[in-house]
Amino acid sequence: MGYLVYLAPKQGEMTMSDPKAAARTAAFARRKAAFAAGQGQAAELLADVLSAHAGKVLAGYMPMRTEIDPLPAMAAHQGLVGVPVIMAAATPLKFREWAPGVAMVPGDFGALIPAEGAWVTPQVVIVPLLAFDTRGYRLGYGGGFYDRTLQGLRAKGPILAIGFAFAAQEVDAVPTDAFDQKLDLVVTEKGLHRFA
């Protein structure tokens, strides 16, 4: 999604633990340094992965700040593409159809979203992140949007969740909670990481 947000939880909702807060601080610094070095062939590698899923509905994201840029791969995808829209705090994301050149407006937290368009249900989701580990877990921004979204989509059928990141964003272990959703693979400028 491309924004940093921590929403104060209501009673019974997920909370951001101290280990995750500390991990986010370190992860932002690593990602900033990697962003300054450039993304190399990352978009081409992502497009290669997506070519095996031609015809499937893809959800990408509009990059912000130091996020690695998936837009070239999204534009090359043979099939419908959507981008995330925040509907409300503590809810899954919805995805509005996107194509290069569509009119965009600022959504919640400044993330760009299509001004209009059909809602789509993705079969493949490109997931932004701050850090990832060898188990396939990711460290997100603290709002829980992608975890809720992946959980809901997986309850309805098979979904391919692809983390997109700089290689420098890999860590030994991401702090996890019971509600965290694993990725199926991560694409970086240095190659692919597949998870069981």
Image (tube, rainbow, N blue to C red):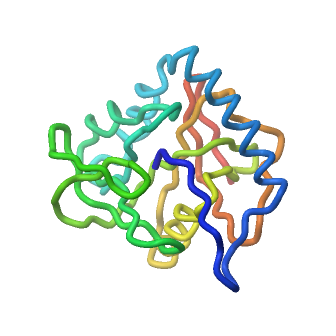
> Residue at coordinates 16% horizontally, 60% vertically from top-left?
117
Quarter of the image that includes the C terminus: bottom right
**132 lies above or below 140:** above
Residue displayed at 38% across by 33% down: 47
- Is 53 positioned to the left or the right of 81 in the image? right
Q: Nearer the viewer, residue 13 or 73?
A: 13
- Residue 139 at x, y = what percent? 68, 50
Total numbered circles:
0
Position of 124 relative to 54 (above/below): below
Identify the residue shown where x is 51% and y is 49%: 127
Dividing the picture into quadrants, the one containing residue 69 is: top left
Image-based side of 105 in relation to 127, left or right: left
In the foreground, 19 or 41? 19
Q: Is residue 8 above or below residue 4?
A: below
Give coordinates of residue 113: x percent, y percent.
Answer: 29, 52
Q: Residue at x 63, y 44 (%)?
A: 194
Q: Seen from this angle, which residue lies furthest bottom?
A: 12
Depicted 181 relative to depicted 185: above or below: below
Query: Residue 17: image x %, image y %?
Result: 80, 62
Indicate left or right for 137 with 107 as reference. right
